[in-house]
Amino acid sequence: MGSRILVVGAGAVGGYFGARLASAGHDVTFLVRERRLQQLRTEGLCLISSVGDVTVTPRTVMAGEIEGPYDIILLSVKAYSLTGAMNDFAPAVGPQTRIVPLLNGMQHLDILADRFGPAAVMGGTCFIVSKLDAQGRIVQAGSLPRLSVGERDGRETPAACSIAETLSGPGFETVCSTRILQDMWDKWVLLAALGSICCLMRGTVGDVASQPAGQDFAQAVIHECASTAAAAGYPLRDAALKGTVSLLTKTDSTLTSSMFRDLLQDAPVEAQQIIGDLVRRARVHRVPTPLLDLTDLNLRVYEQQRHA
């Protein structure tokens, strides 16, 4: 009998991986809110993708309708929605349930472990370029998406390998990682640097990099993020660091961060989880981060204005 998978969130990330898993025949249920439920009932869950379009009629459940534990919970919500999401999916967590979070930053691991116990919480991360369009369809572009999952202590357990095998299907690559915390830090450095560059300068990577001091600024931001990761015990390997520098200093790049896109729409941003928590850890390790501090201040002012 296959594992029962609960996907929390049917947005651009969870919706993509969940739809791929469902179309491959896995036992997938989506935990959704009323508005998304109506959309899915009317339109189905539709992927428009560089690796093949698909539409599935998803099995859905709302908070309050969960009637027992699931084997795997694939958690894909914005970090600022974590508390509400935990309350919603708590009835789905049993003694054997494993939670695979695909949130940005690192602090959600501690929050989840405090609530559900350390044994329930795995490390997880993904690389995907996707967004919801006006009709609620998931539009995925770029290279083949990747999902990584692993035990937080780095052991290659049968359970981790089994979960990675279950969370696999056509349309993305799945990796059972024995260095998942490093993978998560690598992505955090990239997201924090990209977010700082775009939000501080109000432009794309190319807008910034094509200006006289733009590439120096981008490299200085990356250096602050990478120095913080190293001080916390997760130094980026040379290849990861070079890849980040190359990606974030391209003069013709149209790349932007999701945080910047949210900011342009006057929407909530993951500022505290991506920038604020990194700054906090930098202070603990006495790493100077003047540009991250400036980004943190900038986004705090933005959030204050939103709530005024």
Image: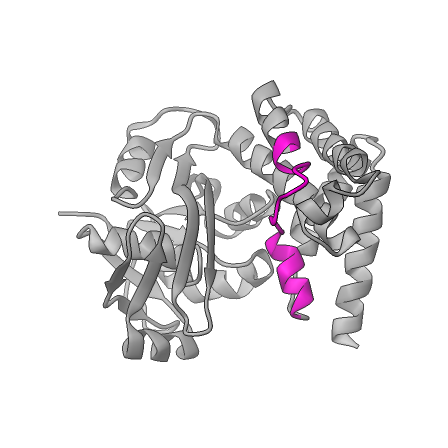
Answer with left or right where residue 228 lies relative to residue 19: right
Q: Which residue is drawn at 69% across and 25% down?
A: 230
Q: Which residue is drawn at 60% across and 44% down?
A: 105
Tell me where residue 247 appears, x and y as whole percent.
Answer: 61, 36
> In the current view of this chain or complex, which residue is farthest to the top?
238
Could you say which is closer to the camera, residue 23 or residue 253? 253
Q: In which quarter of the image is residue 88?
A: bottom left
Q: Residue at x 64, y 43 (%)?
A: 252
Q: Which residue is drawn at 75% across and 32% down?
A: 219
Could you say which is closer to the camera, residue 274 or residue 154? 274
Q: Is residue 62 magenta?
A: no
Could you say which is closer to the camera, residue 297 or residue 266? 266
> In the current view of this chain or complex, which residue is farthest to the left?
1
Answer with left or right where residue 114 lies relative to residue 14: right
Q: Does the magenta stretch include residue 262?
A: yes
| Quadrant where the C terminus is found in the figure | bottom right
Tell me where residue 192 appears, x and y as whole percent.
Answer: 67, 43
The relative height of residue 130 versus residue 252 in the rendered view (above or below) is below
The answer to whether residue 16 of the structure is visible from this angle is yes
Answer with left or right where residue 155 lies relative to residue 240: left
The answer to whether residue 93 of the structure is visible from this angle is no
Task: Tell me the magenta residue range.
Answer: 245-265
Tell me where residue 190 appears, x and y as whole percent.
Answer: 62, 38
Colouring scheme applied when the structure was drawn: one colour
Tell me where residue 303 appears, x and y as whole percent.
Answer: 75, 66
Q: In which quarter of the image is residue 91?
A: bottom left
Answer with left or right where residue 29 lies relative to residue 139: left
Q: Quadrant of residue 110?
A: top right
